[in-house]
Amino acid sequence: MKLSEFQIESYPDKIQARLERRERLRNTNVPDYIKGKVAELVFEDLKLWRVGIVTVSFKDGNKELHKKIADTASQWSNYGNLIFDFGLDSSTREYRQWTANDTSHIRIGFEYSGYWSLVGTDSDDINIAKPGEITLNLSGFNNRLPSNWKGTVLHEFGHALGFHHEHQTPDIECDFDWPKLYDYLGGPPNYWPKAKVDHNLRQLKQGTGYKYSAHDIESIMHYSFPEWMFKSGANSPCHTSENNDLSEEDKKMMGKAYPFEQEMIAEIDSSRIENLSELCKIENLPESTNQIHKKHLDYYLSKK
């Protein structure tokens, strides 16, 4: 593969800036521990939706394309207690259409460059995505479907469910050739600063992910990187061919993140209510951040 042919998921600059700003505020104003748990672990847990229904809308594209995306994404629901509601009208066979002030949990668009999705409930955070802004992008799908479109849809909806890249798992550190990566991704057409490279590729710290398994090279969330990116080339433990289907571990992790057992659901709800209540007490946070925590808390309290 030629270097110029390789693309990596990347948020639009405005969304990346909002995410970085939120992290700075958290690092400044939020204590390291919340109710005895590492703060980062609490925040990652809160990126997972509550079991039930998540609404989805489409901006542009026809109903045939919408059906293909909806049918493919819904494979995740076979393995966890969460359903994507695409707003299918049984009489017209039309799916939910995007609106200018859309507050659907996931808002699919095709207008931005590349493929990307906000992670879980980040798409419901007005500090990150304003009403009507796209939260999951599939560049050009409305014009022509790429050969690997099904794998791309499953991967991006994995992010929308709250799952991170498998190559960033705390279980293993990929042997990336960082100087080569910084040099390549810092040039055209990406022009990525070092911080953006690190955000997308560096290993997540122990305890920052909600749940993770042993490194699963077959995961739909594992990127297929070219050999030149690794110090050990094709022998790298992180080098794999492109994955286009859910792995057995993907299916298991979906069930753990979105359990069917009522006892597990009640336990998760109780834990999140405690953590959100504590977050609402923190002083010196922006009002918009407090509103998000209160909105999140009210939602969980309404389900009790």
Image (spheres, helix red, strand yellow):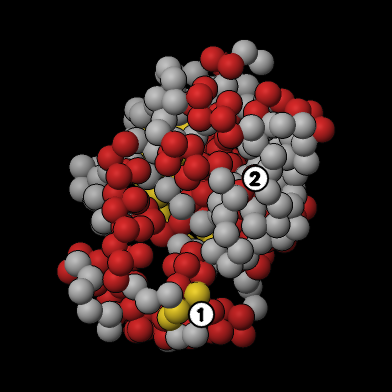
- Disc 2 secondary structure class: helix
Label tally: 2
| Res 168 label | none
Mark 2 sits on what residue? 167
Q: Residues within 10 Å of mark 1 (few under 14, many from 20)?
A: few
Under circle 1, the secondary element is strand
* Residue denoted by label 1: 37
Query: What amino acid is at disc 2?
Result: His
In the picture, which quadrant includes the N terminus?
top right
Q: Is residue 57 visible?
A: no
Residue at 65% in and 28% down: 229
Q: Is residue 212 visible?
A: yes
Residue at image coords 52%, 49%: 159
Q: Is residue 108 above or below residue 45?
A: above
Image quarter in which the C terminus is found: bottom left
Q: Is residue 27 above or below residue 188?
A: below
Question: Looking at the picture, which amino acid does disc 1 mark?
Answer: Lys
Seen at 17% across and 69% down, the residue is 287
